[in-house]
Amino acid sequence: MNKKLLSFLMLIVVTVVLAACNGDSGNSDGAGEENGDTGEASSGDTEGSEDGEASDDGTEITFWHAMSGPHQDAITELTDAFNESQDDYTVVEQNQGDYETLNQSIMASGVSDDLPTLAQATSSNIPDWASNDLIVPLDDLLSEHFDPEIQEDIFQGFLEGATYQDEIMAMPFSKSVRVLYVNDDIVEELGVEVPETWEEIQEIGSQMSEDGDERFAMGLEATVHMELETMARQNGAEWISDDLSTVDIGGEAAVEPMQFIADGVEEGWMRTAGEDGFMSGPFSQGEILFYIGSSAGLAHVAPAAEENDVSWSTAELPVYGGGDPLTLLAGNDLTVFSSASDEEQQGAMAFMEFLLQPENTAKWAMDTGYVPVTNAGVESEDYQEYLEENPRAEAAALETEYATASPLFVGSGEYWDLMTQAQDNMLIDGEDVQDTMQTLEEETVQIIEENN
């Protein structure tokens, strides 16, 4: 093991020990789901023998994940179906807690060389794991052990979001997009149309304020980084280029939508979740006309809205600045670890191919609120029937055509922290938007240059 990797892993071990001593179980990082799966430990944890042991049931493949509740049930059902479908491999799925704890477990296990065969990874995990040689590029494995028709059918933005330094480092799996949640009761009451642009929302919000309506026209989650990046890129900002050579966070095209958000909050027609934690709460209580959140949050909105007798629907995201439609991806992918044997890696590819078969990616989406990662999954008979019966899922399905991912780079976790702090400075403390965004751009450039 090289000295760089050993030092990095030992730092993670110290972090895990300190966290355990402080009783800190961690939360989902910025790349994980908001209002989606919480990643809490579940009684569905599965214990297996040592990774890679051959048995009467074939080579054992260990799979670490951060699913809980209904998501845990869904992944267990698919895993059991794969195991029953063939005799060469047995996948043993093991819940590791939330996303942060999963990442800590991976890094700590790198020291003892006791890594699983494959695991879920959020977008911030992939560069760190790849740069420390913990995971293997999948290009050769895909060409040798994966159905090319399935690979070609994966939505391009989803696959690009799993590509790091021109190599496919993960396979898309649990993917979500941002959607507009709509309070149909207030829409009918005000006699307005569901907006297609941010300018239309501003007009509705301004009119509500003039009329003394204390409800908010627009709600955003506690951190607005995904909405800001989406609006900036719709407005023509490159934000961070795929090759990391350009950072366009402090330019006019990015500053303009941030100022738009800050003005909307100050004028009182827009608000963030703040102490409510997630905007699904106020929305489900009838306090918000529109809000933007994860498509994986549908299951969280439904019961609360029903309890409060709120009629609601979803729509595609509004567009800012006259640009093209765009939504950012969230969720997680599947990675294969370099410590796994050739046979174990082949088994991991067989499992991932099974999960991406049209009927299975569709089933996963229907059971969890994520979206199918292939066109065939979206177009499958089962999923189309599901959309007819569940029209609130249709907006997310439509957005898969233009969904895209933020670029991957080492240090993205630090970048997300700085982004969140900068937004607090602007929205809470009232700091100048232009100056704050320019400083954030300079800090982001420094992170990229020092780590990539």
Image (cartoon, rainbow, N blue to C red):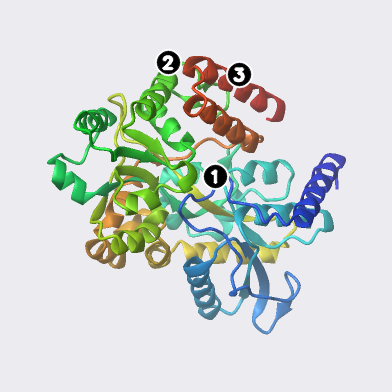
**How many neighbours does mark 3 have within 10 angstroms: few (below 14), some (14-19), or many (20 or more)?**
some
Q: Please state, as top left, top right, bottom left or bottom right, where the C terminus lies in the image.
A: top right
Residue that sits furthest to the left in the current view: 191
Q: Secondary structure at mark 3?
A: helix
Measured from the top left, where is residue 436 in percent x and y? 54, 19
Residue that sits furthest to the front in the current view: 212
Disc on the earlier residue, 3 or 2: 2
Name which quarter of the figure residue 89 lies in.
bottom right
Q: Is residue 95 above or below residue 236?
A: below
- Residue 187 marker: none
Q: Is residue 166 left or right of residue 390?
A: right
Q: Is residue 151 above or below residue 326?
A: below
Name which quarter of the figure residue 23 lies in.
bottom right
Q: Which residue is mark 1?
A: 31
Measured from the top left, where is residue 220 in percent x and y? 40, 40
Q: Which residue is mark 3?
A: 442
Q: Closest to the observer: 168 or 322?
A: 322
Q: Is residue 187 above or below residue 285?
A: above
Q: Closest to the observer: 373 or 38?
A: 38
Q: Residue at x 84, y 47 (%)?
A: 10
Q: Which residue is mark 2?
A: 252
Q: Residue at x 39, y 52 (%)?
A: 281
